[in-house]
């Protein structure tokens, strides 16, 4: 009734590795989208056993109950949402993290968990071409958050603290705060505004520039000026690099300049750049223009767990002021006091997030960067962009098909000229084949199919197969 | 420059499993607490490579840079903070999750990820003796959060929504909210209050009952009544089962009854029970009294990643009203709409948490419950409680040693009669041996050594060794 001894772990661990290898090798044989009804798994799950059960039986349960009710995000035909890369390199790195089993809430509770993360985030900042102010040497710093949602939330909290002159920690929000997004901004911003106690009334929806889906910097400037004149307090503006719906890119530079103009000294409007999906493209020099203007922002977030080969969760967040998040979030009870923290020489990442505890997430990111090298990562990104460009060219050339918006990196949005019902029916028909999974959005009131190319296993043949399915009658 | 093919993964995966097996087998040979200075790891980390590197080199880096700078939470001599159990069973379950690489934000994005979690949480609710109202069949339900901090935050958000009559989502907080804790409540509650925009001013510190560290239900009732009379709004009270400092248990039943009395109809005070460490003890019938009164609460949280053998992160949260968290947290943009959600027949766990994305965390919990069986889990818990009772008896019998407070399950708090400086020096001396790790707290202004017994590998011999170190001159 005790834990596996190291020898049993060795034997069973090999069996699990083999199971994973077999699952990935055969992943193309499953329907991409799970084809079960609600309750299918619940009806088949065994009761909790009183006595220890052999591990092999768990693998059998996985084959019987879990795999048939799984949507296979790692399948080469997965084109839905955004990719959720879980490369096998990252899986190995995560296994090392589980094996070490450390808790990285404080520097002192496992120094390597903090410092490996600091070094990787510095290295990635450099590789992305971020302003050196975002590195630890530059007075800023990076951290691995669980998600872009959580990154946006802590950025908002730091902004509330800063724009309150420090009163927020004691008095809370006061109802004058305003946060600026667009209708295309990810819903996590609206959620962060709600969580932070501002209410939807604090959310200002900035209109797009005419003929685009990108935020109008001028409209933002006007709204912020109006709000200031009305005695309200602009707290944060969130330009997006690569919106979820269509991959639109807000003009970060113009927005950041407008933010500077309309904040008040010491209470500057916080500019948080949400580049959850597209930001990693800046690793390729030819795509570096996507992060233009980020050097004027306060924080920048891009997800390693979308298109950067790293298994969820690993959202990368950099801030220009390393003191900003601890200033907003730190609370130190006696049982967390320690001499390293008191010395001021270390970073305690618990003060960069809402949860206290944290895994050694940096290992899976390190495993990816080590195993692929930056050139391998770039090849991964470039391959998908090239495939998306091909798909785009096929759509443009195909009668009855339309691009809904211009392609953004590896995201292609299409619709049928025949109208929304035909487009919707096409999506359903293609998904029903089980060979691919596509999801949708609505652009200007019209139903649009999104093709997000980016799964680790996706090659040209899979995009060709998708195109065949889309165009077959 | 592509990902490992399944055969390479098989070979390297076996090597990683072997590395982990070797690490765990030899874990007792390392100093428990890392003995490096700030910057030690940063100075030794390699730059990000441009070209792919062989995986074996990463394992060599781990041995060179990471292990010497790791505090070994899985070591048998780890008695600090609370345990962070990462049993090898759970490590295997987590590896399966990484291999599947699914994203469980919605039921539809991988039905098994949601339903396995639902079934396990129902089974555990039953095994813990929780009121059936906390199960899915009973109208409530359970979820796996990343941490007790996040669980407390979402409980508070649900409470803000409920006590506002639904106005909170639109208008935010209004400054009249009050949240009740004690000085011993975990700092995550103060953090949640801050994150939610209430400010520290909204936090009411209820005094303990005379001669104890547990919340006085009467004092809480009086404070709540005063606040209501003053036009303020009691939102949430958080009784703790097993405080972090000393393992004190607040009187949940009396507090919940007082909460009922002082809430207003339709705006009842939310009772969130934080049993992060101690709650799992209720799996043993002889310790079930620790959850007395939880049937009167609104939510209950206990961590599988502390003493329940499951690698971080896996905090178990149950609520009595399955609609409460989605009512507070749900926001549905077009790209997340799907027919399963629209049908109302499924649970979308994204609405139970702040982040949108989520891992298939249930697999590691399932692996633990399957591999140990409930009897194996109980044996794990009972073994540590018995060891703590022995240690307690040694302390009581030893001249110059004092119990600072009565033992709470497997947590023993001691000090030297010679005073704080002697106790502090003893802690430092014992930790400096590298054989064990202890942490401290302060009780009634006096410095106290905490001995939290609960690491998976801890046996009687390790507690004997600890006692030898504590009593050697």
Image (spheres, coloured by chain):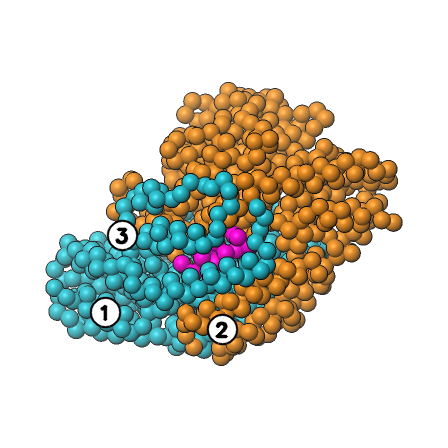
Chain colours: A orange, B cyan
Between A185 and B322, the one lying in front of the other is A185
The residue tagged with tag 3: helix, strand or loop? loop
Q: Is residue A153 visible?
A: no
Q: Is residue B187 above or below residue B369?
A: above
Q: CA distance from mark 3 to mark 2?
A: 35 Å
Residue B465: which numbered mark, if any? 1
Disc 3 residue crowd, few under 14, some 14–19, many 20+, Cα 10 Å: some
User: Over which residues does the magenta segment extend?
Assistant: A88-100
Q: Is residue A416 above or below residue A212?
A: below
- Mark nearest the camera among 3 and 2 is 3
Disc 1 residue crowd, few under 14, some 14–19, many 20+, Cα 10 Å: some
Most common SS among magenta residues: helix
Q: Which residue is mark 3?
A: B35
Work out whether mark 1 precedes mark 2 in sequence or the reverse, and give the earlier one.
Answer: 2
Asked if marks 3 and 2 touch (Cβ < 8 Å), the reply is: no
Residue under the point 87% across and 49% down: A473
Work out whether mark 3 precedes mark 2 in sequence or the reverse, and give the earlier one.
Answer: 3
Asked if marks 1 and 2 touch (Cβ < 8 Å), the reply is: no
The quadrant the C terminus of chain B occupies is bottom left
């Amino acid at each position: 009734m005790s834990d596996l001894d190291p020898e049993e772990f060795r034997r069973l661990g090999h069996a699990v590795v083999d199971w994973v290898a077999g699952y990935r090798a055969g992943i193309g044989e499953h329907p991409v989208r799970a084809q079960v009804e609600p309750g299918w798994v619940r009806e088949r799950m065994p009761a909790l056993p009183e006595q220890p059960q052999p591990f092999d039986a768990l693998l059998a349960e996985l084959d019987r109950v879990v795999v048939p009710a799984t949507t296979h995000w790692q399948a080469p035909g997965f084109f839905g949402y955004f990719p959720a890369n879980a490369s096998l390199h990252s899986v190995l790195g995560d296994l090392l993290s589980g094996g070490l089993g450390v808790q990285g809430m404080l520097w002192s509770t496992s120094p390597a968990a903090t410092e490996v993360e600091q070094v990787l985030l510095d290295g990635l900042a450099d590789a992305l071409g971020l302003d050196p102010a975002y590195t630890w040497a530059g007075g800023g710093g990076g951290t691995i958050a669980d998600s872009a949602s959580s990154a946006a939330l802590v950025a908002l909290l730091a902004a509330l603290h800063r724009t309150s002159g420090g009163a927020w920690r004691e008095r809370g929000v006061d109802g004058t705060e305003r946060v600026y997004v667009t209708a295309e901004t990810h819903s996590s911003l609206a959620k962060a505004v709600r969580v932070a106690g501002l209410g939807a009334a604090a959310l200002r929806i900035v209109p797009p520039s005419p003929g685009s889906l990108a935020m109008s910097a001028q409209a933002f400037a006007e709204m912020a000026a109006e709000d200031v004149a009305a005695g309200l307090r602009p707290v944060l503006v969130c330009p997006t690099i690569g919106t979820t719906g269509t991959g639109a890119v807000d003009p970060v530079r113009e927005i950041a300049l407008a933010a500077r103009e309309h904040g008040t000294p010491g209470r500057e409007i916080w500019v948080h750049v949400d580049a959850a999906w597209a930001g990693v493209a800046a690793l390729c020099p030819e795509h570096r223009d996507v992060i233009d203007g980020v050097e004027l922002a306060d924080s920048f977030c891009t997800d390693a767990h979308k298109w950067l080969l790293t298994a969820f969760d690993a959202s990368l967040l950099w801030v220009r002021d390393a003191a900003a998040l601890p200033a907003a979030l730190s609370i130190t009870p006696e049982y967390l006091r320690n001499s390293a923290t008191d010395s001021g020489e270390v970073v305690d990442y618990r003060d960069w997030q809402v949860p206290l505890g944290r895994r050694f997430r940096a290992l899976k990111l390190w495993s990816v960067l080590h195993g692929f090298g930056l050139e391998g990562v770039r090849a991964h990104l470039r391959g998908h962009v090239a495939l998306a460009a091909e798909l785009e060219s096929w759509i443009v050339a195909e009668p009855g098909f339309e691009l809904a918006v211009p392609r953004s990196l590896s995201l292609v949005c299409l619709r049928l000229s025949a109208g929304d019902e035909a487009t919707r029916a096409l999506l359903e028909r293609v998904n029903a084949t089980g060979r691919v999974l596509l999801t949708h959005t609505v652009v200007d009131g019209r139903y649009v199919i999104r093709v997000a190319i980016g799964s680790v296993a996706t090659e040209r043949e899979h995009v060709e197969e998708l195109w065949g399915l889309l165009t077959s009658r």
